[in-house]
Image: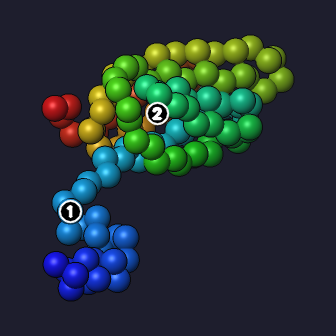
Amino acid sequence: MKRLSAFLSALPLPVLGFLCGCHSYQIDATVENRTGAAIELLEVDYPSASFGADTLASGADFHYRFQVRGSGPVKVQYTEDGSYKVRQMSGTEVFEHQEGRLEIVLLPEGKAEFRPQLSPHL
């Protein structure tokens, strides 16, 4: 038993995670600004947390990887540069233990397309 515990304590943490069968479910998100203008105060809310950027130029993309705790809709909010009009929209629902990709395409006139490519929720 001492040999086994000495062996396990010498292994790096990633190897221990692999041996234990641990899996980290993550969603790779991309927010694409196709509004035709720069935006400010971009915020993407999902169950248990949020991410965002101070500014996002017209035609630019913002990438972020996140993990879902709980379930609920993904919501996007941003301010139009210049007019300071706040745009809000709600999109696809995500669930704990989902993984894959989520594209959020911000379009003119406060519209957005949510393009999920996610594993089914359990």
Farthest residue to the front: give it: 2
In terms of secondary structure, where does tag 1 sit?
helix
Instruction: Using the numbered discs, state the Cα–Cα distance from disc 2 to disc 1 in whole angstroms.
Output: 34 Å
User: How crowded is the residue under tag 1: few (<14 C-alpha within 10 Å), some, or many (20+)?
Assistant: few
Q: Residue at x 62, y 36 (%)?
A: 52
Badge count: 2
Give the image location of residue 16, x and y in percent: 28, 70
Q: With 59 as the anchor, is 118 left or right in this view? A: left
Disc 1 target residue: 20
Q: Is residue 112 visible?
A: no
Give the image location of residue 77, x and y in percent: 61, 21
Picture layout, residue 63 above or below residue 92 = below
In terms of secondary structure, where does tag 2 sit?
strand
Which is more N-terminal, label 1 or label 2?
A: 1
Q: With 72 as the anchor, is 65 left or right in this view? A: right
Amino acid type assigned to the residue bearing label 1 in the image:
Cys
Give whichever of 119, 104 is nearer the camera. Answer: 119
Disc 2 target residue: 104
Residue 98 in which image quadrant? top left
Q: With 75 as the anchor, is 37 left or right in this view? A: right
Give whichever of 86, 64 is nearer the camera. Answer: 64
Q: Residue at x 54, y 39 (%)?
A: 32
Q: Is residue 24 visible?
A: yes
On-image quarter of the N terminus: bottom left
Amino acid type assigned to the residue bearing label 2 in the image:
Ile
